[in-house]
Image (cartoon, rainbow, N blue to C red):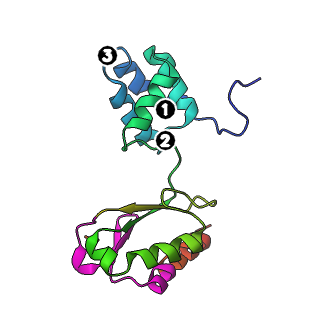
Amino acid sequence: MSESCCCEKKSDLSLLEGVLAEYAPQKGSLITILQHAQEIYGYLPVDVIYHIAERTGQSPAQVMGVATFYAQFRLKPVGKHPIMLCKGTACHVNGANSIEKAITEKLKIQDGETTEDGLFTLKTVACLGCCSLSPVMMISGETYGSLTPAKALKILDELREKEVAAQ
Ligand code: FES
C-alpha cells in the first residue's frame, strides 16, 4: 500500500534525479534544489519535499521550513493563466479594487488561489511598471491596460473560451 495520502497526486520523482545527483551531496544547496524542483513541477508538491528531505539528510520539517520561508516558492499548483493584478498606487487610484472584486466574484477565488479547473491563479502585485496604462493586469506575460471590471471579465471569458475550443 502506498504511504502517501490517497488525495495527493504522485509526482514523477525521477525527473529530479539529475538535480539531486548533482546538488544533494553539496552542503548548503537546499535552495538550489528547491528552485530546480519548482522549475520541473511548477510548484513544490509534498511528496517532492519528502524526497528532497530524504536525499539531503534533512527532516521534512526543515525542508518545508525553507520552502515556506521564501516567497519565491509555491506549495500549490499555479493555474495555466496566472493573473497578476496590479494594486500599486496608480492602479489603486484608478480602480484596481473594483477590478479585483469583479475577478474574485467571477472566478470564485481570492488572492493567491487557483480556480477549480486549474485555469487561473490570481495574484495581486505592487506595480507592474506600466502605470500610464493603469489599472493594469498581466496574464501569461501579456499586459492588459486601462481596465474596467467589464473589460477584465471579458478578457477572462475570452481566455476560457479559447481553452474550451482547444480541448
Ligand atoms: S501602479 Fe500599477 S503598473 Fe504601476
> Dividing the picture into quarters, in which one does residue 133 lie?
bottom left
Q: Residue at x 65, y 39 (%)?
A: 9
The kind of residue on which mark 2 rests is Tyr
Left or right: residue 132 compared with residue 16: left
Residue 82 in sight in this render = yes
Mark 1 vs 2: CB contact within 8 A = yes
Magenta span covers which residues? Answer: 127-154
What residue do we see at 58% from left, 30% from top? Answer: 47
At which x and y percent is residue 16? 46, 29
Q: Tag 3, which secondary structure?
A: loop
- What amino acid type is highlighted by mark number 1? Leu
Quadrant in which the C terminus appears: bottom right
Residue name at image x 58 percent, y 35 percent: 11
Q: Earlier in the sequence, mark 1 or mark 2?
A: 1
Q: Tell me how far mark 1 sits from mark 2, CA to CA.
A: 9 Å
Q: Residue at x 45, y 16 (%)?
A: 58
Q: Is residue 164 above or below residue 70?
A: below
The stretch drawn in magenta includes residue 149 = yes
Is the N terminus in the top left, top right, bottom left or bottom right quadrant? top right
Cα distance in 3D space between marks 3 and 2: 22 Å
Is residue 12 visible to the viewer in this orientation of the structure?
no
Mark 3 — residue? 26
The amino acid on which the numbered mark 3 sits, given as a three-letter code, is Gln
Answer few, some or many: residues within 10 Å of disc 1's Cα (few below 14, many 20 plus, some between 14 and 19).
few
Element type where label 1 sits in the image: helix
- Count neighbours of disc 3 (C-alpha within 10 A) and say few if under 14, some if 14 to 19, many if 20 or more: few
SS for dot 2: helix
Of labels 1 and 2, the one closer to you: 2
In this figure, which residue is indicated by the disc labeled 1? 15
Q: Which residue is mark 2?
A: 41
